[in-house]
Amino acid sequence: MVDLDNLVKIANSGQFPDLMNSSDVDNIKELINAQSLNSSVDLGIIKTSPTKPTRYGIKVQVPTGVGQVQLYDGTILENKIFRYLVDNKSIYFEEGKPDVPVEEFLYFDDVPLFAPTIDALCELATIITDNSDTSKLRELLNLLEDVVPDNDDYALTTLVLSKSNKSIKLGLNKIADQTVSTEVFKFLGTRSNTKLYQSIQSASMLTENVLLNDSNRTEVYLEFNSTGLVKELAFALYPRYHKSVNDYVEGEDYGGVSKEQRHTNTISQVKECSWMPDKWSAEIFAWENHHPTAVYAVAILTAKLEGFQIELEYGY
Amino acid sequence: MELLDGILHFGNVLSTVDHRRLLEICRGIDFPDYKAGNDTDSMYNLHANRGEILLSPDDKELYDLTHKVMLKVMPKIYKGYSEINPPNPPLFDKYSGYWLCKYPEGGYLSYHTDADADAGSVTVSYTINDDYEGGEVVFWKKHTINKQANSVHVYPSNFLYPHEVNPVTKGERYSIIVWFAYQKGEQWLI
């Protein structure tokens, strides 16, 4: 929930020079006015390092089980995959552009990857990007689907659609208890000795501890746009458990570790990651503690040819 | 390959929240009257004592939860049978509909095969609860399969897989049965 008076106080306190400063408050005010929002809206903020424009997002309800979704501009997209949407989505706006969203985040209830769901995703990718050659995307999804024989390896949980950038990002929940296959690095990096391969491999190694920890939920993100499959791979690190859920994990409460503690453990782990910018490490724990509804959402490490990009999503 | 290898088992299919909700809905349903021998098929000499309901998409929440079960296990079914299937098998895009079954105390299903479903099909049985006694599913009069709530068993619907459900001696057993096929049945959509 957005409490503007409180945001002003927080910004003035100087407690969060990077996560909530006076520019953030101004941008949020601008968004609230442009979108005629009331204070009950859930707010998300995404900061990027190296610095890019900050994005501010709002959560809205969507119907479920109907095989279609309506975008912010009124476009109705039809696709089988939308049957499995959960009941809300997030619409993100860039700072200074509060009238037209830059991305819409759609969330799904773990849709497994297999032939018909891969077909549906490729169809959707063409509609969003106007690029009908989805062969590389299909090949990569098939590769991910088959990493561990006889097992579910990845399931679709997030789609990030950007009509303005003609781009679709696929967030795949990593179910298999293993690191991402080097076959995937080779596919994206062309072969095993390229700079991109090494960048992705480094990102995988740097996130390995988080990937394999049961308190965390990890996703890999792929991007496809009007030029084709983007040669990068992102690792998104979520807490598996929500903040302020003080019960125990069924069958796993032998250590007396509550879900809330597990949530906190995830943030501790992400905070300690060497790739996390110091400015965020210093603020993210305090962020969660300054308000009952303040949460860390996800940290995303993207391995690109030119190096790493880190995004931090948090909010109320 | 041994016949036993043709029976696949997948546990923890739904999330805890979804599974609890599905069980809650099932327990609130009024099943049609049933009595011993009401579900008979003379060709297969099948007799049973159970209530069954064909779920309609209009039963939205229950149907959607059931569909979620099947969506989650379908890729595993393909992988589970990948050694004996062609490399790119056609999709099981036909189905029998989802049949919700309730076995009351004394409920049972006699020894039979699912061979009438379709020669090219598999049977999927979702075990909803396990807080009952008796009611075991037994293949070939000797192999009892794991009775685990929120888990799925899959087996070929042919004459090589005869099975039965022992009488429930205490409590109520809920399960969902569906046959998937290549040619025969209603259209199954992801």
Image (spheres, coloured by chain):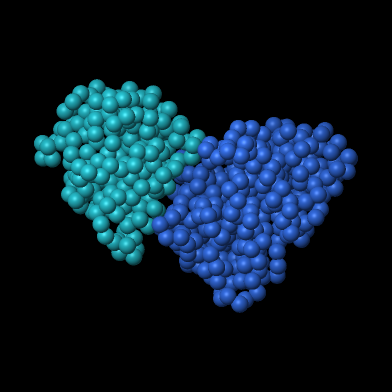
Chain colours: A blue, B cyan
In front: A71, or B43? B43
Q: Is residue A189 left or right of residue B112?
A: right
In front: B182, or A102? B182
Residue A82 visible in this rendered orientation of the protein: yes
Q: Which percent across, then down, holds residue A109?
A: 51, 44
- Residue A278's quadrant in the figure? bottom right
Q: Is residue A237 left or right of residue B75?
A: right
Q: Which percent across, then down, holds residue B130?
A: 37, 33
Residue at figure coordinates x 64%, y 71% from the top left: A198
Q: Is residue A244 above or below residue A92?
A: above
Q: Is residue A66 above or below residue A119?
A: above
Q: Quadrant of the N terminus of chain A?
A: top right
Q: Which percent across, then down, holds residue A82?
A: 49, 46
All told, the count of numbered labels is 0
- Residue A90's quadrant in the figure? top right
Q: Which percent across, then down, holds residue A260?
A: 66, 37
Residue A52 visible in this rendered orientation of the protein: no
Q: Is residue A54 left or right of residue A109?
A: right
Residue at figure coordinates x 44%, y 49% from the top left: A80
In front: B161, or B15? B161
Q: Quadrant of the C terminus of chain A?
A: top right
In the displayed orientation, state which residue is furthest to the front.
A254
Residue at figure coordinates x 74%, y 35% from the top left: A2
